[in-house]
Image (spheres, coloured by chain):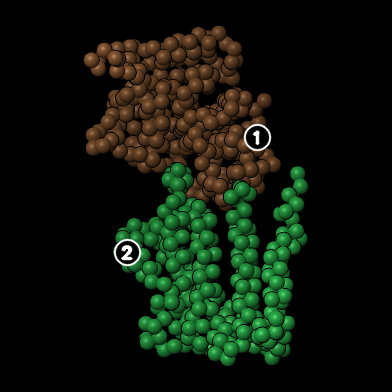
Amino acid sequence: MIHSPLLSRQDAEAKAGGKGALSISDLNKSFDIGGQPRPVLENINLTVQPGEFVSIVGASGCGKSTLLRLIVGLDTDYSGDLRLDGQRIATTSLDRGIVFQDHRLFPWMTLEENIELALLNTDTPKARRAQIVADHIALVNLKGFEKAYPHQLSGGMAQRAAIARALVTEPKLLLLDEPLGALDALTRVHVQNEIQRIWMTQRSTMVMVTHDVEEALYLGDRVVVMSPNPGRIRRVVDVDLPHPRDRSSPLLHRLKDEILAELTSGADTARAPANLVHLPSREDRG
Amino acid sequence: MTAPALSRLPVRVALGFIVPVSLILWWQAQSGGHDANFTPPAALAAAADMLRDGTLPADALATLRRAFTGLLIGAPLGIAAGVTMGIWRPLDRLLGPLLHGLRQVPMIGWLPLLGLWFGVGESTELIVVSLSAFFPAMLNSHAGVVQVERRFLEVGRIYGFGLIQRIRLILLPAAMPLILTGVTQALAFAWIASIATEILTGAGSGLGVTMQLAQVQQRLDVMLVAVAVTAALGFAINQIVQRLRRLLLRWQPASL
């Protein structure tokens, strides 16, 4: 059952400007560590279709969160090309929303105020804002908690509120940076279902970073598998199943095993031992 | 769950009175007539006299007015300076060293200098009180703004906040716990500075002036009354400020 207070797909597409097509080409990013440039993202090429849900999985350190920070515009120090609907990304914009792993609600504002602040710099008429905020609170099933402060919400509720805050501006592109990473398994499943429902309602483009392969497959039209040091795209897996999905689908399980095998062993086996700790053996001390 | 018995209000008030009342009883038992001025009944009689002729309320009011005027001058200036320096680095670099140097001078250290410039009177007292309120307000506000977490500022960037929105919706509320700590300290310092400057300059009226006069006149009873009223008023002001703080910071979890 989908109650839809939000824009339908057609309305969303009819909005002025583009539709949320993301293109990443030859993207490179490095951090300066101790005076040495250290590459974190190398030669990333990816095109995301309007309305598509793309999941990105990879071990920690593969630069997936860095990639989202670049796309949302919080970090603009990169080489290569990052475009949303043909426009180069040079700063933050209300076209792009993001949900972080930590909910980042302002502790000094009520749930309602936290969501409404996203509309401050939009051209939404002031008279309609309260209604839009109420609709989005209902969308993430938080009715009755409008006046609650973040410390009065559970982790799952706070994260749903953060999702509502990100959605309220109707961004063409919504980025999700391990949004469920801090939740317990049961709440996770619940919020995953909710994200799927919202995505099917809104059909805005979504890119979600996660370290949970199952979650990536359950939600994504495509799953981008990344390898670390430096972060590269290793493989893109198509998940050719209609939404809403059945968690017990054999295809999802087969793909999960495949991706997990790739993540844990991988093509660059030669490098794997470098991650192990080598204790100096007694003979070496001789 | 009921509140633990020890934290209920009437119980707390009763507990708070045990030690002061015991001290007074002990004092009464000790005062074996050698100094007629220095007994609880004498002090009570002096208090009644001072209430009747109106000097006690007038003194308390004068000191309160001095402390709050100083607070109202010093604390807003301190908050403004601290917040501005916290937001705008160049100003911090420019004024920080000077202000941190000046604050090393105890408030009483300003009296001789200001006395020479402005004369030993109300204006000198007020300047010292304002200065006393200024520094704690400035230091805490500065620390509060500097410590605002980057993750909250990033949310502001994502939703296109301008400078005013950033200050009003993120920096000030996030810094509010420390700003209020600064105001609480500023009030305590202003109160202490008021009494101290009154004692040292003896100008105008006030609890400190009365203490000083009582010393000259060897009136131990009057001195005790002034000290007791100073303590009680300071305590009451602090209670009010703590209430206000809890009201303003109701968004914080109760444990903080």
Indicate the quadrant where residue B216 lies: bottom right
Q: Are marks 2 and 1 on the same chain?
A: no
Q: Quadrant of residue B112?
A: bottom left
Which is more toward the observer, A265 or B45?
Answer: B45
- Whether residue A87 is visible, yes or no, is no
- Identify by letter the chain in green: B
* Residue A82 shows in the view: yes
Residue type beneath disc 2: Pro
Pick the residue in front: B7 or A235. Answer: B7
In the rendered image, which quarter is residue A89 located in? top left
- In the image, is residue A112 above or below residue B217? above
Q: Please, is residue B124 above or below residue A50 in the view?
A: below
Cα–Cα gap, marks 2 and 1: 53 Å
**Residue name at image x 50 percent, y 60 percent:** B179
Q: Which mark is residue B97?
A: 2
Q: Chain of mark 1?
A: A
Quarter holding the N terminus of chain A is top right
Please indicate whether residue A57 sits to the left or right of residue B61 in the image. Answer: left
Quadrant where the C terminus of chain A is found in the figure: top left
- The x, y position of residue A200, in whole percent, is 57, 26
Checking the image for residue B86, the label placed there is none
At horizontal 54% and vertical 69% (from top left) the residue drawn is: B187
| Residue A62: percent from left, percent from top | 37, 25
- Give above or below for A265 relative to A66: above
Specify the subunit that label 2 lies on.
B
- Pointer 2 and pointer 1: residues touching (CB < 8 Å)? no
**Mark number for residue A141?**
1
Residue A229 placement, left or right of A162: left
| The hue in which chain A appears in the rendered picture of the protein | brown
Amino acid type, mark 1? Asn
